[in-house]
Image: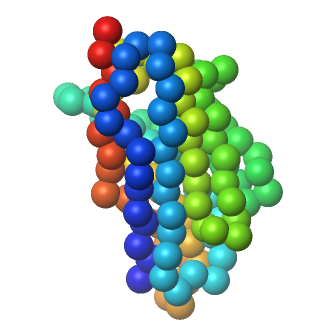
Amino acid sequence: QVQLVESGGGLVQAGGSQRLSCAASGTIFSINVMGWYRQAPGKQRELVARISKGGSTDYQDSVKGRFTISRDNAKNTVYLQMNSLKPEDTAVYYCNVESLVLAGWREYWGQGTQVTVAS
């Protein structure tokens, strides 16, 4: 079993910055893609950014140039640096990890952390 512990989030003024972290623990043999998704009230969960084990990144168009995803493979941790935040970035942010465990490759989700951007 893999546990994902998220930290960061909270209330920030528009134009401000926040950093989210997500640490994976458990019996993990390898981690492939790590990513961040978000879900705003009344909307579907959407991909924000993801990063491969080798460091290749992929971003939603609306966050390009403002958000940066990174990872520390030694710590099984993924980060999301969010700058120039806008009210429309308000959502619950979830980390997502594809891990190789005893049962094979599995996908895991964090519990979610609320990010609120005040105008």
Name the residue: 73% across, 60% down.
Answer: 53
Q: How many marks?
A: 0
Residue 10 or 28: which is nearer the viewer?
A: 10
Name the residue: 66% across, 76% down.
Answer: 30
Q: Position of residue 48 (x, y in %)?
A: 51, 35
Q: Quadrant of the C terminus?
A: top left
Q: Position of residue 6 (x, y in %)?
A: 41, 56
Q: Position of residue 5 (x, y in %)?
A: 41, 63
Name the residue: 51% across, 64% down.
Answer: 23
In the rendered image, the vertical position of residue 84 relative to residue 57, given as above or below: above
Residue 108 in sight here: yes
* Name of the residue lying farthest toward the bottom: 102
* Residue 52 appears left or right of 60: right
* Name of the residue lying farthest toward the left: 42
* Residue 109 appears left or right of 22: left
Colour mode? rainbow
In the rendered image, the vertical position of residue 16 relative to residue 107, given as above or below: above
* Residue 84 appears left or right of 30: left
Q: Quadrant of the N terminus?
A: bottom left
Q: Position of residue 95 (x, y in %)?
A: 45, 52
Q: Quadrant of residue 43?
A: top left
Name the residue: 33% across, 46% down.
Answer: 113
* Name of the residue lying farthest toward the right: 54
Residue 60 in sight here: no
